[in-house]
Image: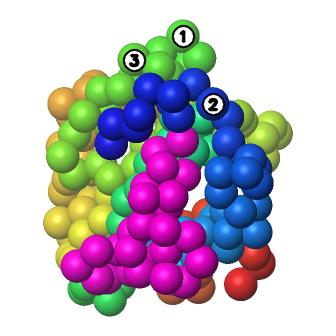
Amino acid sequence: MNLPATRQDQNYLFDTQSISAWGLLRLREQLENGLPLAPRPYLTLAERTGLTEQQVMQAVSQWQQQGLIKRLGLVVKHRTLGYRANAMAVWNVPDDRVSELGKALAASPVVTLCYQRPRRLPDWPYNLFCMIHGIDRNRVQSQLQKLVHEHRLEDIPHAVLFSNKAYLQRGGRYVSDR
């Protein structure tokens, strides 16, 4: 979204002269629940927060520019869609290879999440994590073996953790704890 030049340079996150601070707080809370499934979701948010549709769009755009909102996306409830064979593969990758390998695994169409985390020694030596969602456990294991073969990971210690139950799956909460 393009903003007027006079608005792009201003930090109006809590500029009560332009947009109500309480309206912005309500907007942040509403965004935590996700975009409404409506033909004009920003208008619906405006109606819920007491802002105008234009103010909602400007605030969202500004928060994206400031990095407060990194992206707007879907939270897919995999189990509801029938994806019940969900596996987190964890790897103990040498530190000098983790970035290269992480990018390679992230480029695979079967990998839905891939990230680096610090090891928690002595109990948890793994530093690279990738998630594969699937409807069939055997198929997920086959996809994982294909990744191992394609990226020559046979010698890298790893483990595969299949989920049993999803207790919570939602976007981030920054204003409310609901």
Magenta-colored stretch includes residue 54: yes
Residue 125 in view here: no
Tell me where the magenta segment starts and ends, as one range: 36-62
> Within 10 angstroms of label 1, few (less than 14), some, or many (20 or more) residues?
few
Q: Position of residue 44 (x, y in %)?
A: 41, 80
Secondary structure mainly formed by the magenta segment = helix
Q: Nearer the viewer, mark 2 or mark 3?
A: 2
Q: Are marks 2 and 3 in contact (CB under 8 Å)?
A: no
Q: Give whichever of 91, 29 is nearer the camera.
A: 29
Which residue matches tag 3? 100
Which residue matches tag 1? 96
Q: Give whichever of 101, 150 is nearer the camera.
A: 101
Residue drawn at (31%, 82%), measured in percent from left and top?
37
Which residue matches tag 2? 10
Residue drawn at (65%, 51%), measured in percent from left and top?
18
Say which label, 2 or 3, has the lower sequence index. Answer: 2
Vertical placement of residue 38 versus 70, above or below:
below
| Amino acid at dot 2 | Gln
Residue drawn at (37%, 59%), measured in percent from left and top?
73
Write down the quadrant of residue 62 in the picture: top right
Q: Position of residue 46 (x, y in %)?
A: 49, 74
Q: Give whichever of 9, 132 is nearer the camera.
A: 9
Answer with left or right where residue 178 lies relative to residue 139. Answer: right
Q: Are marks 1 and 2 in contact (CB under 8 Å)?
A: no
Q: Position of residue 47 (x, y in %)?
A: 49, 82
